[in-house]
Amino acid sequence: MRALASTVVAHRHRGHFERRWNRPSRRALGIALLSAILATCGPPSETLVDSVEPIEDDDEDPISFLGTWTREFDVGPGNTHIATYVVASDRIHYTLTGDVGNADYIMIRHAFSRTDNRFVGHSKDGEYYVLFARDISDRNVTIYKQKVDGLTAALELAMPPNDTTENHGWNSYEKSQDASAPE
């Protein structure tokens, strides 16, 4: 009876024995290894953004501060930063540029409440944010933003007091004149 493919065959080579896999075993091992690699690989998994469905909120409560809002501020001498919110009906794009810090991400809308001008959204990385807006006019808005531990925390967070310093507090933004309000 022939040896099975997985058996080790002893060969005499230069005065001593060495063990080698016979050819069928090497093929079987190669096929098994390739199968294991292919089994662990597959189509790319969906991103967190694709796997989180927005909450249906009241369409009669459109976001009350649509548009592009910008604020310049100094972080030490000679370190001017620019923070921008581009507020659309389904998302807010936040950018921060400057020498000390930079950021660029989109918060996809889950819900908006006109009662307290609360926007709840998440980034593609699954980070949740809640924004509150007050003192809204055609040219200015005051915004407070906080990163939270999930959707429930965002929905339950109370509107911060006007004098809070948490999360950089409330900040005033001016509407950009060169950009029209996004839809």
Image: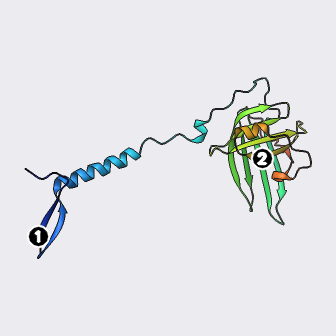
Residue 98 position in % (x across, y down) = 75, 58
Residue 104 placed where, x, y %? 69, 49
Q: Is residue 166 above or below residue 44?
A: below
- For the residues carrying marks 2 and 1, which lies nearer the camera in this image? 1
Q: Secondary structure at mark 2?
A: strand
Residue at screen point 61% across, 39% down: 49
177 shown above or below 77:
above
Residue at horizontal 56 percent and vertical 41 percent from the top: 47
Q: CA distance from mark 2 to mark 1?
A: 73 Å
Which residue of the protein is positioned furthest toward the front in this rendering? 1
Q: Is residue 33 left or right of residue 12?
A: right
Drawn side of residue 133 relative to residue 56, left or right: right
For the point 85% across and 30% down, the residue is: 115
Q: Nearer the viewer, residue 98 or 106?
A: 106
| Residue 128, quarter of picture | top right
- Cβ atoms under marks 2 and 1 closer than 8 Å: no
Q: Quadrant of residue 69?
A: top right
| Quadrant location, the C terminus | top right
